[in-house]
Image (spheres, grey):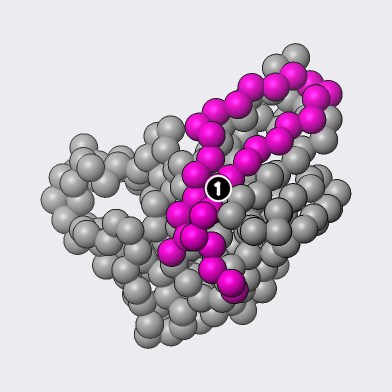
Amino acid sequence: LAKTTQPISMDSYEGQEVNITCSHNNIATNDYITWYQQFPSQGPRFIIQGYKTKVTNEVASLFIPADRKSSTLSLPRVSLSDTAVYYCLVGESGGYNKLIFGAGTRLAVHP
Amino acid sequence: NAGVTQTPKFQVLKTGQSMTLQCAQDMNHNSMYWYRQDPGMGLRLIYYSASEGTTDKGEVPNGYNVSRLNKREFSLRLESAAPSQTSVYFCASLGPNEQFFGPGTRLTVL
């Protein structure tokens, strides 16, 4: 199982770009990298998934270097509503496997 | 589509009591998962299931049993609740790219 390591917490201000990096040194060839967001008292929800290079959707971008041993979630122009915990997971996309969450990164966005 | 539903939303038990947490999904997903989340912590995998009749242990299976009744339903049972099992329990199902989570069950064991 590919273990992930993220910063425990980050602080930012409204309107700034936030980059959260996740390390996954023993990622396997078939593994994808998936990021989730969790608000208090709610279950996590999917943000973005990628395999290599760069993926962008309407809420975030995901940057994955060629060696795939890390990934960076980029949130452009954050607002107060982006205050949440962000989790990085590694595993086969859609595949049945032991999906383990790490401790996540607690992002606080300040006015 | 209701997505992933969980019942009950809240439950208070006394030490030694038993109960079953129910989870159902209407997205025709094969794989389902049970996690627990203690205050201020990340999610920890309890059990997961690939299909009806198939279950596997996660990170913290002790004190729990599960049943994959059919493709839709995956239940979690506490046979003899302990205060250490006070937590929020999330059920999830796995789609083509992502997991879909239920709203959670907040369980307190006194």
Majority secondary structure of magenta residues: loop
- The residue labelled by disc 1 is A23
Give the residues drawn in magenta, as a range.
A1-30
Instruction: Specify whether residue B20 is in view.
Output: no
Q: Residue at x 38, y 82 (%)?
A: B54
Q: Nearer the viewer, residue A8 or B63?
A: A8
Q: Position of residue B9 (x, y in %)?
A: 46, 48
Residue farthest to the front?
A: A67
Q: Is residue B110 above or below residue B17?
A: above
Instruction: Say which quadrant the C terminus of chain A sits in.
Output: top right
Whether A4 is among the magenta residues is yes
Can you say whether B32 is above or below B78 in the image? below
Q: Which residue is at the front of the view, B17 or A29? A: A29
Residue B64: where, in percent of width, then height? 25, 61
Q: Could you tell me which residue is drawn at 51 percent across and 55 percent down? A: A25
Task: Report if residue A73 lies within the magenta region.
Answer: no
Instruction: Residue at 29% x, 56% y: name it.
Output: B60
Q: Nearer the viewer, residue A4 or A46?
A: A4
Residue A85 image position (x, y, % from top left): 58, 37
At mark 1, the secondary structure is strand
- Which of the 4 quarters of the picture holds residue B49? bottom left
Residue extending farthest top: A111
Quadrant containing the N terminus of chain A is: bottom left
Number of numbered discs visible in the structure rendering: 1
Residue A92 appears in the picture as rendered: yes
How many C-alpha atoms fall within 10 Å of the one at disc 1: few (<14), some, or many (≥20)? some
Q: Nearer the viewer, residue B106 or A22?
A: A22
**Amino acid marked by disc 1:** Ser
Q: Is residue A69 left or right of residue B17?
A: right
| Residue at image location 30% in from the left, 42% down from the top | B86
* Up-down relation of residue A96 to residue A98 (above or below): below
